[in-house]
Amino acid sequence: MTINLTDAYIERCDKETEDTIAQEQSSFLATPITYFKQHLNEFLYIESPSFEAVKIDAISLEVDDVFRTYMVLLGLKVQKKHTSTIKTFLEEHLHTTETKNYSAMFSGEDGLWELNIPIDFIEGFSESMTVDEALTLALQFIQKLIQTTEQNN
């Protein structure tokens, strides 16, 4: 799966205030992901029409303040009836002997799943990745999750 982010809206934001630090060009995605361990107060927010293919409208990337894992946060447009499938998928496909610090909650108000996923625990992750490579890995993971929900429908 290839997601074209050349048309994406990208912001670096302050975690505490959620204020925009800078609006970025797609060239920022070539930055090493370790940037976010060096700037723990920041998160990256991205909107792209390309995300519709994986049933999300935006994604955020940050380092978790407690666990120091790279996290993607997103709203997934999948029905609540897929609760068991989603939680089983996350348990089975996030690889670690550490605490699996993910969260998956359905928001009835928004009609979507609020997912916080540690990409460190997705097979294939490496800290030598760029932001773009890490996002691609996370989006491929989400695509597999969606395929699993569709197969179990």
Image: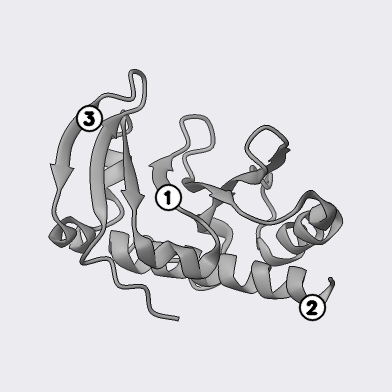
Q: Which mark is residue 67?
A: none
> Mark 3 is on which residue type?
Thr
Cα distance in 3D space between marks 3 and 2: 39 Å
Is 91 on the left-hand or right-hand side of 30?
Answer: right
Residue drawn at x 65%, y 46% as measured from the top left: 112
Which label's residue is closer to the chain start, 3 or 1?
3
Identify the image quadrant of the C terminus.
Answer: bottom right
Q: Quadrant of residue 62?
A: top left
Q: Which residue matches tag 1?
A: 58
**Where 140 falls versus 99 (above or below)?**
below
Q: Quadrant of residue 7?
A: bottom left
CB-based contact (under 8 Å), mark 3 and mark 2: no
> Mark 1 is on which residue type?
Ala
Question: Which SS class for mark 3?
Answer: strand
> Mark 2 is on which residue type?
Gln
Residue drawn at x 67%, y 43% as measured from the top left: 111
